[in-house]
Image (cartoon, rainbow, N blue to C red):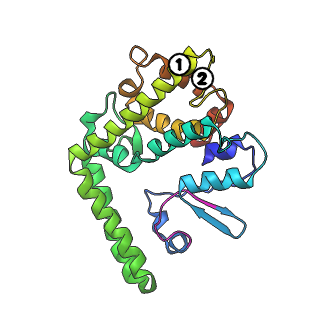
Amino acid sequence: VLLTLLEKQVEFTRRVINLGAGENTQPWFIKINPLGVVPVLKDGDNVVCDSEVIIDYIEQNIESGNKLIPEISTPEFQAADKLRKMIHGVNYQTISFGLAVHPSLSVTGSRFAGGMGPEAFKMSINRQKEELRTKMKDNPDMKDDYQAKLGVKEELEQRLSDVNKVKAALNLCDDVMNEAETALKKYKDDGIKDSWLVGQDFTVADVVFTILLHRSEILGLSARFYPEEKKPYLYDYVQRLMARPSVKKMLDIEGGVA
């Protein structure tokens, strides 16, 4: 979402929600978004949740900056939509916290959440569950919301205990990388120099892919997903991507961590 706002060259006020401190479970935030997830976009009286929905909202309502979604009747739209759906299928929570629980799955070591390991994750999830139980008691009118959030935490804990589920999530990332490599090679073979994922223009597909690539680097998975010797077109794409002004600004704002 941040990268979309930067590409559209729109003014915005950024509010960081401290997930580690449980700020996303505070009553004021739950009233905005009962699921207690980020990001959330507030535009006047409109509150929009979910990254994909927010991106579409920004594109539909902001005319400035770069057009990120191709015309629906074009091959570029179909290609962008396919990649976007593939990337949307990646469970960031599973791969990020999954590598905390199973650190051997990282190639060079994960820096996510300060390099959180298995014991730190266990302590964190137990603390979060206890805080949710306390908030249920303190806010009886929001009991159902907090009960649902508690269920999400318990499901996450159970899911991550199964290393095969984490591996499956990583394999899905492999599929996305392979699809990107194939597309980039095709455009190069067709004579399009320095193409983006669906051709000459930087689109929403590149926006969402940038976030996956950045998270991959933080998780110590770059050598698995796009080594130069095995994915030369994708490797070159990443170098160009990281030099793009909006991407550089995004990384500067976030301090290199997302």
Q: Residue furthest right?
A: 64
Q: Callout 1: 10 Å neighbours few (<14), some, many (20+)?
A: some
Q: Secondary structure at mark 2?
A: helix
Residue 25 in view here? yes
Residue 127: image quadrant is bottom left
* Residue 198, quarter of picture: top right
Q: Position of residue 4 (x, y in %)?
A: 64, 45
**Residue at x-position 56% and y-position 30%:** 197
**SS assignment at label 1:** helix
**x then y, percent, for residue 232:** 46, 16
Q: Which mark is residue 18?
A: none
Query: Residue flagged by tag 1: what amino acid is it?
Result: Asp
Stretch in magenta: 32-41
Residue 188 falls within the magenta-colored stretch = no
Q: Amino acid at mark 2?
A: Arg
Query: On the image, which quarter does residue 80 sit in?
Result: top right
* Residue 252 in view in this figure: no
Of residue 108 and residue 39, the one placed in the foreground of this image is: 39
Left or right: residue 130 versus residue 43 is left
In this rendering, position of residue 19 left or right of residue 162: right
The residue lying at 72 percent from left, 41 percent from top is 67
Taking 185 as reference, is 166 above or below it?
below
Q: Which residue is mark 2?
A: 240
- Which residue is tagged 1? 236
- Is the Cβ of the residue at disc 2 closer than 8 Å to that at disc 1? yes
Number of other residues with Cα within 10 Å of mark 2, as a class: few under 14, some 14 to 19, many 20 or more:
few
